[in-house]
Amino acid sequence: MGTDGIKMKKVEIVIESVMIEEVISIIDQAGVSGYTILPSVTGRGHRGKRMGVGFTDVLNNTMIFTLTDETTALKISNRVKKLIQNYAGVVII
Amino acid sequence: MGTDGIKMKKVEIVIESVMIEEVISIIDQAGVSGYTILPSVTGRGHRGKRMGVGFTDVLNNTMIFTLTDETTALKISNRVKKLIQNYAGVVII
Amino acid sequence: MGTDGIKMKKVEIVIESVMIEEVISIIDQAGVSGYTILPSVTGRGHRGKRMGVGFTDVLNNTMIFTLTDETTALKISNRVKKLIQNYAGVVII
Amino acid sequence: MDTNLLSNLMTPPILFFFFGVFVRLIGSNLEIPKALTKFFSLFMLMAIGIEGGTAMADSGLGQEAVVVLISAVVMSMLVPLYSYPILRIRLKNLYDAAAIASCYGSVSAVTFIAASSFLTKMGVDYGGYMIVSLVLMESPAIVMAVLLATTVRSKEAHNEGAQSEGRPPLLPMKKILHEAFTDGTHLMLIGSLVIGAMTGMEGKKVMEPFTGGIFKGMLAFFLLDMGLSVATRLREMKDVGVFLVGFGVVMPVINSGIALGIAHMLGFGMGDAFLFMILVASASYIAVPAVVRYAIPEANPSLYFTMALAITFPFNIIVGIPLYFKMVSAVWGG
Amino acid sequence: MDTNLLSNLMTPPILFFFFGVFVRLIGSNLEIPKALTKFFSLFMLMAIGIEGGTAMADSGLGQEAVVVLISAVVMSMLVPLYSYPILRIRLKNLYDAAAIASCYGSVSAVTFIAASSFLTKMGVDYGGYMIVSLVLMESPAIVMAVLLATTVRSKEAHNEGAQSEGRPPLLPMKKILHEAFTDGTHLMLIGSLVIGAMTGMEGKKVMEPFTGGIFKGMLAFFLLDMGLSVATRLREMKDVGVFLVGFGVVMPVINSGIALGIAHMLGFGMGDAFLFMILVASASYIAVPAVVRYAIPEANPSLYFTMALAITFPFNIIVGIPLYFKMVSAVWGG
Amino acid sequence: MDTNLLSNLMTPPILFFFFGVFVRLIGSNLEIPKALTKFFSLFMLMAIGIEGGTAMADSGLGQEAVVVLISAVVMSMLVPLYSYPILRIRLKNLYDAAAIASCYGSVSAVTFIAASSFLTKMGVDYGGYMIVSLVLMESPAIVMAVLLATTVRSKEAHNEGAQSEGRPPLLPMKKILHEAFTDGTHLMLIGSLVIGAMTGMEGKKVMEPFTGGIFKGMLAFFLLDMGLSVATRLREMKDVGVFLVGFGVVMPVINSGIALGIAHMLGFGMGDAFLFMILVASASYIAVPAVVRYAIPEANPSLYFTMALAITFPFNIIVGIPLYFKMVSAVWGG
Ligand SMILES: Nc1ncnc2c1ncn2[C@@H]1O[C@H](COP(=O)(O)O)[C@@H](O)[C@H]1O
Ligand SMILES: Nc1ncnc2c1ncn2[C@@H]1O[C@H](COP(=O)(O)O)[C@@H](O)[C@H]1O
Ligand SMILES: Nc1ncnc2c1ncn2[C@@H]1O[C@H](COP(=O)(O)O)[C@@H](O)[C@H]1O
Ligand code: NA
Ligand code: NA
Ligand code: NA
């Protein structure tokens, strides 16, 4: 896996939409070269169904993934995991 | 891969939109803690192009993934594979 | 990973929306049995933020993935990598 | 009168349909966002529902209306019944035959809209209960198809004997019927009809600029998108052979003829007769295919959906409307 | 008068709300695309903003208006303050209490729209500055909630002592206030109000067919979607116990009573008084929950969002509007 | 007259543009769903297309019209030709120069709409064929850009000699031209024009409440979204240096001056002259960037798209429209 021959990790994050800006700044601060956002996903988790209503983002999720080296991947994952103690979300490396 | 240190599998399913409720109930019945839905994807497969028209879901796909342990992942995968003998879809573990 | 017992690879591609037809024809020419498109994703990369404006696709991305055997996966990846020298995009195997 | 016919047909919405077909055939990237197409279709169902409901509230359901409604329900069951054996002549997959038969038993709301606005332009009246007919003709056709499919299945099971174990699981009948009667587009039409009937002329007036004034513009956009979809399906049409193309063109004419006979026999008014022909001649590509996909998974949606949308719909819009009008005029002496 | 009340309430848009609830409860797949619901909500804020701004431009801000506006701001801070201790009686999670209190301090624009169009049908006047009240009541309630939550947090930190280290990080207050005052829906309303005030009657006329003519139709679609959402939340309502359901129904009545008292004391006009009651009695399910989610992550959105949307909103629409109108009529001698 | 100019410019739609810029600059999360922005842009092309087509049907294409149309096409080729060498003065990447030149040769439909509604408010007439000019000016500019890029490429290939092997593959010219002439937004405008011409006043009347009545409201929403997009681009503008900002502001004035000279020389009417100036002065940020991205991948879309959208568009709306109108008034003696 990887674009440049280096061993890359894909970190996938599902987060409630109101917090996407926070996740982006975590990724930015980790110095990663890029990320891709899947703007509108829904789902179910420990916090119940998040199947969105159109007029507010409170029950919507957003997905984001970033390709990066293993160390950075772990760094991002740890910071986001702290965030999702309070906010709905899941991290996959 | 995983959120809790346990070895987790990601099961990804693309299914024709009319059957998404059936797939969700397969996942629910397997006792998985959550899933994420990507509501509107298109694609091509053995059943031809499914590039959606707006006014009906008949030619739309929906994607769903769930993180779970290996045994449950296989269980879900097997049940969905039965479903997609009849309906358009693909399963990735 | 795989639908038919054969060892399958998942090739994921993020590409600027104007070029999605080209990527599809690369996949088609490689003789792959199918693909799935996530029509509207946004992101950041070496070419800056691609957070889309509604009235033009110039700053939108599209994501596509295809399940295929390893050789074909590499073939597709190589051809798309040539494309993204000129156009925004990223390839993940 | 023929140029009059043509000019009453060639309104901007219909022309946008042709434009959509053209645009996709030359390979343009023009797209109407799907969220809007979905909305346009709901909007149109709301608009005709309210229209019909208000008309009903105004005039009530007289004996004439009841006769029309019964005829409509009966025809929506008869059409699948006699279409199925015709389709069997050439189709090996009997599920496909059942699914197609079902679509042709049901109706196309957009064809109805085009026909009724054509009728209005020709200065011919019709009863508000025709919209109730439109509503009533959706579900029976689905039920017929499910019955046909069940027959096929039990026959197959019998032929195959014990082998049938390996077959993929089917959805329980209860789920299928629930789906058939709670389909969103179907309910939208019924709900709007009821709300129109409850609020009458006053309700209609409140909604007028939305459901009336801007209707033709919304229709134009919707038909543009339908044109794009039709052309896309035409490009993918390899599945649909000559037999089915023929069916998609000839069957509406036969169906409209039968409808004409019934309408005449039962003494329908000219406008009602014309719209009855349209209902019987049109095929569903919104509500029915969605439910049939669910109920008869063994059938190929590329066939029934493509036939209803890409063959019969354009045929009815271009050839059908003026043809059926001429037929009805000839008999009613218009 | 009661049948008159009812018929003025049961307009197509409100009926589409009930239809939406019904449709989802019977398990239909009817959906309004989310992009459109979002648009409808912005559209409605634009429409009432321009309406209010134009009225302001026309009549200016007299002394009466200033009194109303001050009362509105005060009430949006008082309601959370006295709701919080009531909620604490039963709620263990004090963050939930703070979040709910905040929603009830703020307002529901759709309830306001329904109430003002009801008022117009009843032939009662009201001041354009009531829309300014609507705007002003959003942010103070949020600020109150943040203050309440901060108190809870520092108390908890004190109790836990050194353990507080392991707690998840919170967002800095500056970010939270920024979010509260720049929330998109909030700004849309303010912006439209200002543009309405700047362009006056001429601007209004230009926008009329959009923000006026088709308004009821758009509202009908939006309320249909709200009905669907309400029913979805009702189905998931296990979190919300009897106490909170009671709160969601009783509190609006109490709040409207207090508002009535204040309005009477300060000599509001009848229409203003009624809308003031509506504002105080209604709870926010658009702007406030979004900001509160951000600001008080410890609170469960299923509680405060569901209560405002699925309990208090329908209650106000069905029971509240006629009830508060009767109350105000009794006092003002209508 | 100046306050008159200003008040005719500061209509709600334009004010919503400023509001959008403001809202994004202060960091609000206000968003118009993308599906709707896409729809609004198609809606606007439909509306002006029908407007123009009807006007054409009404008055035909006289000699005056033909002269205007030829001038329009010629200018859309000349502007890139003389812009390119200017841009080369400072730009190292010649592909960027070609791409930018192309955008400025083409036109902005929204600027045209704002200008023509301003003109109507000022009580000045113009010919329906101006919309045809708008259509005709899109493609030639793209073709010019492709030619310029091809020249650059062959020069580079010559300089690099055999090394050119490693370069990324380009799309065949046939594909590029296909893309240029079948771009969706481009065809939408042409199609609507033709449909307008075919159905004439009657067709226009049918579509009026949609394409006429609610037009300003839709425009307001679209301009709000453009404001948001402009501010987003302004925030990301590090790529665009002083030279290009200057080009984006000065070039429209030069272009409008040249257009004024030609219009005067050829004896255009005052309204036609003004709109001709607007067309020549404006730059494309919808159709052309999409095709250029495809055709000249070596050019950076952040440059040409940002310049056309975030610099020249606001400049023309705020400064350009009144300025060009003063210029044209001075010469035509308005
Ligand atoms: N096991 C899982 N598999 C896939 N997605 C999940 C899973 N658990 C949670 N999610 C996603 O993360 C969101 C928040 O989860 P939670 O915080 O557990 O409620 C859900 O709404 C889902 O979209
Ligand atoms: N090899 C593949 N790679 C990725 N997606 C696929 C593949 N095959 C099928 N799909 C997806 O699954 C859907 C149904 O496939 P099928 O049932 O084979 O027509 C397609 O429309 C695609 O979205
Ligand atoms: N490291 C990365 N991780 C995830 N997505 C990326 C990454 N780099 C680039 N992308 C995606 O690919 C698009 C184009 O990237 P680029 O060509 O580098 O600007 C971006 O807009 C992102 O959507
Ligand atoms: Na039929
Ligand atoms: Na309140
Ligand atoms: Na130009």
Image (spheres, coloured by chain):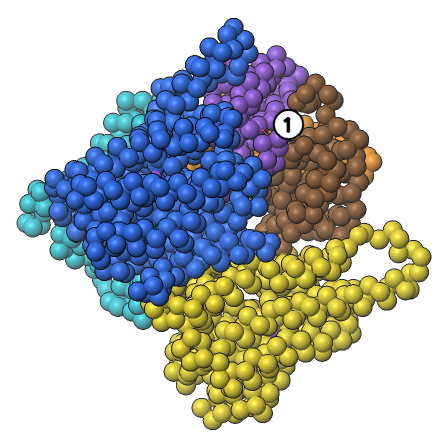
Chain colours: A brown, B orange, C purple, D cyan, E yellow, F blue
Residue D123 appears in which quarter of the rendering? bottom left
Q: Judge from the rendering whether residue A72 lies leftward or rightward of residue B21; answer left or right.
A: right
* Nearer to me, E72 or F156: F156
Q: Quadrant of the N terminus of chain E?
A: bottom left
- 10 Å crowding of disc 1: few (<14), some (14-19), many (20+): some
Q: Secondary structure at mark 1?
A: strand
Q: Residue furthest top?
A: F162
Mark 1, chain letter?
Answer: B
Q: Tell me where residue E272 appears, x and y as whole percent.
A: 49, 83
- In the image, is residue E6 above or below residue E268? above
Give amino acid for label 1.
Ile
* Nearer to me, F333 or D223: F333
- In the image, is residue D304 above or below residue E249? above
Quadrant where ligand 3 appears: top right
Q: Tell me where residue F171 appears, x and y as whole percent.
A: 43, 19
Identified at 22% across, 58% down, the residue is F334
Specify whether residue A91 is in view.
no
- In the image, is residue D90 above or below residue D109? above
Specify whether residue E95 is in view.
yes
Ligand 2 within 8 A of label 1's CB?
yes
Q: Which residue is mark 1?
A: B92
* Nearer to me, A37 or F323: F323
Q: Judge from the rendering whether residue F60 lies leftward or rightward of residue E3; answer left or right.
A: left
Q: Tell me where residue E247 appears, x and y as whole percent.
A: 67, 73
Identified at 34% across, 63% down, the residue is F2
Q: Judge from the rendering whether residue C22 lies leftward or rightward of residue F238; answer left or right.
A: left
Q: Quadrant of the C terminus of chain E?
A: bottom left
